[in-house]
Each structure stands twice: as structure tokens, then as C-alpha cells.
Image (cartoon, coloured by chain):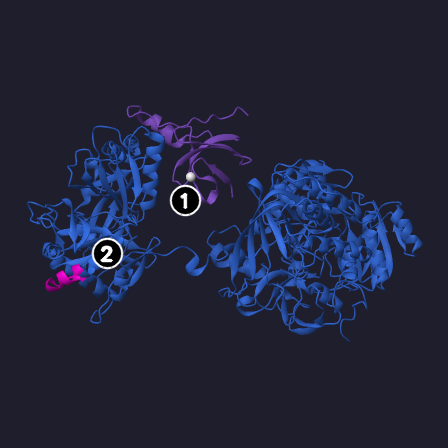
Amino acid sequence: MSQPHRLAAGGHVDRTRRVSFTFDGRRYEGHPGDTLASALLANGVRLVGRSFKYHRPRGIFSAGVEEPNALVELRDGARREPNTRATVVELFDGLAATSQNRRGSLAFDWMAVNGLLAPWLGAGFYYKTFMWPAAYWERVYEPLIRKAAGLGRASGLPDPDRYEAAHAHCDVLVVGAGAAGLAAARAAGATGARVILAEQDALPGGDLLNEPGLEPWRTEALAALAAMPEVTIMPRTTVFGFYDQGVLGAVERVADHLPEPPPHTPRQRSWTIRAREVVLATGAHERLIAFPGNDRPGVMLAGAARSYARRFGVRAGENVALFATHDGAYDAAFALAEAGARIAAIIDPRPDSPAMQRAREAGFAVRAGSVVSATVGGTALRGIELRAAGGSGRGDAVAADLLMISGGWNPAVHLASMSGAALAWDEGLQAFVPGPPAQRERSAGACRGVHGIGAAAADGAAAGRAAAIAAGFAAAPDIALPDAPAPDHRPHPLWEVRGRGKAFVDIQDDVTADDIRLAHREGFSHIEHAKRYTTHAMGTDQGKTGGIVGAAVLAEARGEPLAKVGLPRFRPYTSPIAWGAMAGEGVGAHFQPTRRTSLHAVHEAAGAVWMDAGIWKRPAYYPKREDADAWASVLREARAVRERVGICDVSTLGKIAVEGPDAAIFLDRVYANTFSTLPVGRARYGLMLREDGIVFDDGTTSRIGPDRFFVTTTTAQAGPVMQHLEFHLASVWPELDVSLASITDQWAGIAIAGPKAREVIAGVVSGLDLSNEAFPFMAVADCMAAGVPARLFRISFSGELAYEIAMPAGYAAHVWQAAMAAGAPHGIEPYGMEALGLLRIEKGHVAGSELNGQTTAQDLGLGRMLKKKGDFIGRVLAQRPGLTDPSRPRLVGLRSLDPRRQIRAGCHLLLPGGDGSSQGWITSATQSVVDPGWIGLGLLRDGEARIGSEMLAANPLMGEEVPVKVISPHMHDPENLRVRA
Amino acid sequence: MLRIPCPHCGPRDEAEFSYRGDATVTRPGPEDGIEAFHGYLYERRNPRGWQVEWWQHGAGCRAFLKVLRHTVTHEIRAVATATEALEVPEA
Ligand SMILES: [Zn+2]
């Protein structure tokens, strides 16, 4: 028989259509309008999962986002999603769900033995037990814990779906489309304000969906809103965070209710909503009561059972008991009775109330002054035990397959709290409600303790009207409100019924009232400490049903009022959000921009192997068919530079135009060395320090005219150096008449290096005397290159005779090709980053591995560059004793004693026969072409004094210890004869 | 997601700006010594309340701006150019 617990009529499900789905491989049917939870209940499935720590059987506990138990894996393959709440998963045809956190079958879980070990698995168990020895963490404890605990499994495959990020602006944002939210949106919309009404459910209405008699008001309100052109209703949209200045974050589940997203449709869309005014109409979550066995399948929040009956047409039990502490819960008993269930008992600690009288009149067995002290059953509820409120021991037993519980309502104050509003204690409601607003926000309805549909709607209408007026709109006529008297929702403060067995305050995290008391005894008495010690309210439900119950147990243990103990701080996200939605479009190639130089196509045509240099794509090397491997290519390219001539794209270097009457003074202050003495037409190597005295960046700066300088930076620091210059010019020396412009993108750069470089340049550049006398090392001049305007620099990174041609980026490919043609007779070869690195290591030039944010000029052997006179950034703090200590690691060269044995960057340098303590490390390593074998640069304590000695380059990760000789870092042409040739 | 009113560009999203810390510290003179520079570089009031701080409008006019921001509420009360004075309110 299909759907034995489905009612014949009523609710918001479409019984004319059937939807087929599977749970743990078994096939079931439901209807459009069902959630997975309502369809499972309609089919009599009550056991849906195993608990986190004790593997106790668990059933469906709620009918909404607050669900602690019914977490399932949804879909399969790459779309498998763990920890989805069955209570909010919309049923679709073909849906496949699997229960989580079980070993073996759901009905018999061998890990349930944890339940027998329970006395040793209390709060802090992991902290206390898995502490020692430390080495056991990685190898033993963590895998064990991960296997035993944890919830669902991620797919482990790339997410096949697409996500979008979007922005929205409005005058009034209304969060929640229950009675309060619908009324607020109508009242605000009537003024002409731009209104967004966001509702996490697929169906707007909130509690109205449980009130067939008020359905005309709901449909009329939705029709009225649909007719307002400035009102946008966003269903399936969870507002998860309230940030500064009226910014709220939301996720719209565009296609989660479908088997997979239709073409050209994102699965989810994350919204950043900027609202002038915000109305929070987020409702309330019903509160559990802690009593032994309150987690057994068949125990359910009263409002949820009512919702399954009224909204979904599902009878969640046949023989039903209600355990409630206030009149607001009694409608659940009437709803279940209307649905055909037998009301076995109503248990209420209070002596009497209007609702109890009505229940008696309806013929229900009301047990006034009583509490539930235990539940009976295995994987399903069979009965409950009662006793007198305030008593102890065992009392009557009542048979029941559904126990509906309600300890009151927790206003959903999350967003109000995140907006900065303090929470205030409401003694009547025994709940925290939002205090005075901190931003332009107002709460309305149940989220501020105004219960009942009529009262909430009136409250919402007032809030919506006030919000629109505050946003600058004129008041509009009042809207029609539903007439619905509400029962008294103020509960008798009953948080816990003590007895034998586990009384859960956080069902998802398996946290019991005893755990909270243990935390207090062990000194974790602050609510935030108790939360972390016990994991209370740290699950996907964030303690929506039991968070305050745990706080109340803590308050009792501390002997202080709950108002003083408070709740843990609310933070985004109010509900679990898919990572994909956070990433939006920023995945794969769109994660960050790809920067290509203007010569990219040229390199591609030359067969370049690419490497990432920051966000730039740069050629690593250009393999040729005859190259045995990558090293063969790199060595071939480097040899071409050392022996003939090579050409390299250096466009990624940062370039800054520094111009103005005070440009030279400014450069003197930002560089450690002097630029005011630099003649026009010359370049100089510059060293820039941070204010703390550490080396910031290096590069060549050229004087183009008396007031015009052309500064280059390293590729990596191009942006930071520009910012650094701008900051000091704006804030420290605003009196200097200097202007700065980044021209990195406008100018491309080509380096031509090698003994034949002058001949190649002569074939490209016109209008210059290139003789060594007329255009010496460090000369700079404007020229024509291959018929286009360009600038020629005689500078060298490789240690060879070398030039760099700078030209407008659009001409770069043209000039490159001209240089290749001019260089062909000389055997010119393009060289990539790898050969560039090899050449500069041989020459002893420092680069990013040495300019690592920890090294001083002295460390790098550049101490003499620091000028003795005049102020410059970093001058004073570079003199601190810790930075001038002569024993600091200094730059040295290193050579592997056995030319075949590789040394690697990152190796530590040890004394042979020493105690194994590190004396320094290798910063860069390569094979050499001038003296074949492995060489490197390193930072070595007492480095200069150790030149000539032997060390061990140790790589414990790979079990390598390679003997090396400490040498001068200037391994190639230390007299600089070649660059000046 | 603050919105910062740039005096040159108008109100712009925080994402266009980068933060550069307390704008009330002044770089010492060249002869002021290590202690003075240490204070300039490392010592901050870290107020709970109003603070004048540097923000650069990097994705806009690139100006360094003085922004009067409340460190608890993130309210931005005033924005000035680098050379204008911006007083920290008493409360
Ligand atoms: Zn600007």
C-alpha cells in the first residue's frame, strides 16, 4: 500500500501527481509539494539516521531548517551532497537519498556500541583522551575519530554545476514571508517603495500554510504583491547574514528542487543585498525539552507534527501524545486528531490552562501537573513514562508512537543579533528577543515574540509601513489583516526532566544536559566555553531547537539567571550554505585573472612551456625535439646566452614613471641608495627597504630627463611598490612635487643578452652609436627599434653583455621578430624563466627567493649600497641590533662536491659531523653551464667566514644529505668584465 | 562590504579600497632615532571606537584617503583627502 500515512485531503500537496524517489535504495512515492521528510513520513519511514557520536537511532524531529537529525546524502556521483536536511529538501521525481553516519544497515548499526561506552564518551572526551603521545594524533587518533564520527561524505568530484553571484538593491528588504513578512511587504509596497521579500521556503506563507481557514488571506496577499511592480518575491532564498551598513547576504536555490539545473541555469545564486531599511520577519523555532530518551524516533516538535498534518497531509503518528508547557502547542493535538490520530495523552506541567480545558472538552486525556520522564522503544517510539512535575522516580506508562513536544518558542533573532542589536530577555516568553536596533532594522512577528497570525501580521504591517516611511516614502492606506486570535505562547519554564538515561540538549551533536553540567564542573562555565567544550549548538542546525535549553541547564548549574548566562554569539550563516554558492563564478579559470604579456602569441608559436609567475603566464622554456628532457632545454638556452646570444620577454617587470621637479629627492628617500646624482641617460640598480629595515624590492631606475625617471620593480612587487610610493608621497611627503604613473601594461620589455648582443641590437636599433664608449654599461637612450619608437637600456641580469629594449606594448611582437631575424646569423635563441633563473644564480643576483621579506641589505651582501647621508625609508630601523648582528645568515654561493648530486632549494645547511642543527638554507639551486654541476645560493650563518668550507645540504623529507662547498655568490665573472665588454 | 564615500569618485564599495591602518601616526624626523621609528611603525592605539585611518582607493582614483570609522559599528562618518585634517571625536 502506497503512502499509508497520507491523509485523503488537505494541505499544499498535489495528490493528482505522483513523484517517485528512493531512500537507502528502496523506492517510495510522494507528491509535488512534499519535502523528503513529509514523503518519508507518509510512507511510514521513521528511522532516518544515526547520531553523530553514539550512533543512536534518529528520526525526523522538525519540519524545517532547524532539523537536527534527518540529515541525508542527496543525489549521487559528482552531485552527491552530504548533510542535506530532509525537512527542507523538496521532493522531485527520481530523487535518491541515503542515510548517513551508519556502519552496516541503518536498523542495526554496529557503531551503536558507542552508546554502551557512553559513560566514557562525555564532553571533552576527545580532548582528554586523544592527547598523548602527540605523534599518535596523525597516525592513530585522527583517522579513528574521522571514521567513527563525522556526518555525510562529500562527492570528492568536481562540482558539475554553475553558481552565480548577484547584487540587489532595495528600499525595504523583508526577510521571511510568513504572516508578518507578507503584511510588511504589502504595507511597504503600497507606498511605492522598492521591496524585496525573501523567503527560504519554496512556498511563501510560513505558519499560514498550516491554517486552511486563512488561505484566502495568503493568496490575496500574494496576488496583491505580484501586482506591485516594485515588489520582488524571492522564494527558496535564505538570508544568511546581516553585515555592516545594511548589507545582507542570501542564497537563492534556483534549481535544487529539480533533478539537475536546466541548461544555462545556475544551481544556486548568492545575493549581496543592500537595503535602506530591513524588516526581519524570520519567525521562531520551537524549543525542545530535555528528558531521557528525547531523541528517539517518534519524538517530534509539536509544531512540526501539526505542519505535517495541515500543510503536507501526513499523519506522523497514529497514537499520539503531547508534552507541552504552554497553550500555543495544543493546536498540534487538534490537528492530529483531525488527521485521524488517537490522542493518547496530553502531558503538561502546569495545573490548568484554557487550552487544557478545551482539550478536555474535546475528550483528550490531559495529565496536568505531569512531565514525561522517559521514552520506551527501540528504533521507534512505543511509549512514554510520566511522573508528577517536580517529582522523581517512575510513574505511569502510556503507549504512543508519536510524542509531540514543545517547551516554548525561540524567536529567530539570528539576523538581528548579527546586525549588532543586543538581545533582551523576555521573562514571559522565557526567550531572548531583539533589543534596540543597531542598524536600520526592525523585527516583526514571532522573531520578536509576537505570536499568533493576526498579531504577527499587524506587527509586520506596522513594521513595513514604518520602514517605507523611514526610507523616504509617504504613508499608504492600511492593508486588510487576518482575524485570528492566538493562544497564549508564554511557557511554564521547564527546561529539563531529570532521570536515568540521556537527556539531549543538542540532539545533532549528541550533547546531553549532563555534558553541560560536566563542562561547568570542569571550569568551562562561560556559555562560549561550554559551547566549545561540549560542541553544544555547533552542528548544522546551530542549536536552533535546543541551544537555549543547554544555556538554561548551564544557568541552573551556575546558580544564575538564564538572562545573565545568555546565548553564544550568533554569526553567519543562519543555515548551511553550499560552498559553490560562496565561490560563485570564481572557479577554475575564473578564480583569478590570467595575465598574458603582449608577446604571448609569439611564445606560444615558439612552443613555450608555460609557468605561472604570480598571475602572469611566462615561458618556462622552449623545448626542441632534440632536447632529452626539460633540463636539456634549459641548459641549451642558458648556454646560448653565455656563448652566443639569447632573447627573453621581460615585460612583466613593474614599471613606474616618476616625474616632477622633486622626483630625484623623492627617489633618494624611497631608495636606500642615491638617485639625485644619476646623470640623464644613465640607469642605476636600486635597493628599496621597508620602514622596518628589511629589503622590499630591487630594480633598475633610469633618468630619462632632469625631472623624469623610469623605475622598474620585480614582477611580484609591482603592485606593492606602486602603493608604497603612492602612500609615502601622499601622506609623508605631500610637499614634494612628484607624479607617479604605473606604466607596466603600456611598455613591453625584451632582453637581448650574450656576447653577440651588440651585433643583434645593431641590426634592430637605429639612431644610436652602440660603441662601448658612446653607449656603455648602464647607458639609456631613446631610439628607433625596427622602425618604431623605443628605448634602449644597457643593463644585464644574466651577467653577459646585454640590452633591454622597451617599446609600446603593441609593437613588442614586431620588435621581437626583427630581433630574431637580426640574431639568426648569430644563433639567437629565446630563453625562458628557467634559464633566466640559472643565469642569475650563476651571477649571484638575488631574486624573490632571497628577497623573501626577512633579509636585510647586509644579509644579501648589499650593505654598502645604503647611503650614509640623508633620510630614506628603512634607514633608522635597519640599524637595530637584531638586524645588524654579524652572525645573521649571509648570502653565499654553494656547489655540490659531486657534480652529479642534485641540491635543492629549501635544503638546510649542516656542519659535517655536527649536531644536526641548521646553520642556514639553500634559497635557489640550479645546474650550472659555466662549470657543469649543481650550484645554488643560500643564506648561511657566518657565511662570509665559511667561504671555502664544506657543509651538508640536508633534505630530511627525501632522505638526502649532499656535501657542498661554500663559495662566493658571484660564481660567474665576478669582475663584471663581460657586462662591460 | 562597507561603502566608502570617496571625495573624488563618490560612494564606492569597500572592495575597491585597501586598508593601510592608523592615520594619526606621523613619521619621525631623520634624527629621531630607533625608539621613535619603532613607535611610528609598531605602536597603535587600537581604539574601541572612532579611528582615523588610511584607505587607498586602489580601483578608483588611487588616492590615499583619511577615513573616520568606528571600529565597533564600522560606521563611516567622514572621509578626507590625505592633506586635510580629520579629528577623532571624543565619544
Ligand atoms: Zn576615488
Residue A467 percent coordinates (x, y): 66, 41
What colour denotes chain B?
Answer: purple
What colour denotes chain A?
Answer: blue
Which residue was labeled with disc 1? B59
Q: Is residue A614 magenta?
A: no
Residue A966 in sight here: no
Label ID, residue A826: none
Q: Which residues are magenta?
A: A818-832
Residue at (22, 65) in percent of width and height: A633
Report the front residue among A119 and A64. Answer: A64
> In the figure, is residue A792 to the left or right of A353?
left
Residue B58 in sight here: yes
> In the figure, is residue A653 to the left or right of A752?
right
Q: Secondary structure at mark 1?
A: loop
How crowded pointer 1 is (Cα within 10 Å; few <14, some 14-19, many 20+) is rated as few
Residue at (71, 35) in percent of width and height: A560
Q: Are marks 2 and 1 on the same chain?
A: no
Residue A122 percent coordinates (x, y): 64, 51
The verdict on label 1 being within 8 Å of ligand 1 is no
Provide the chain ID for the residue under circle 1.
Answer: B
Which residue was labeled with disc 2? A812
Q: CA distance from mark 2 to mark 1?
A: 27 Å
- Determine the quadrant in which ligand 1 lies: top left
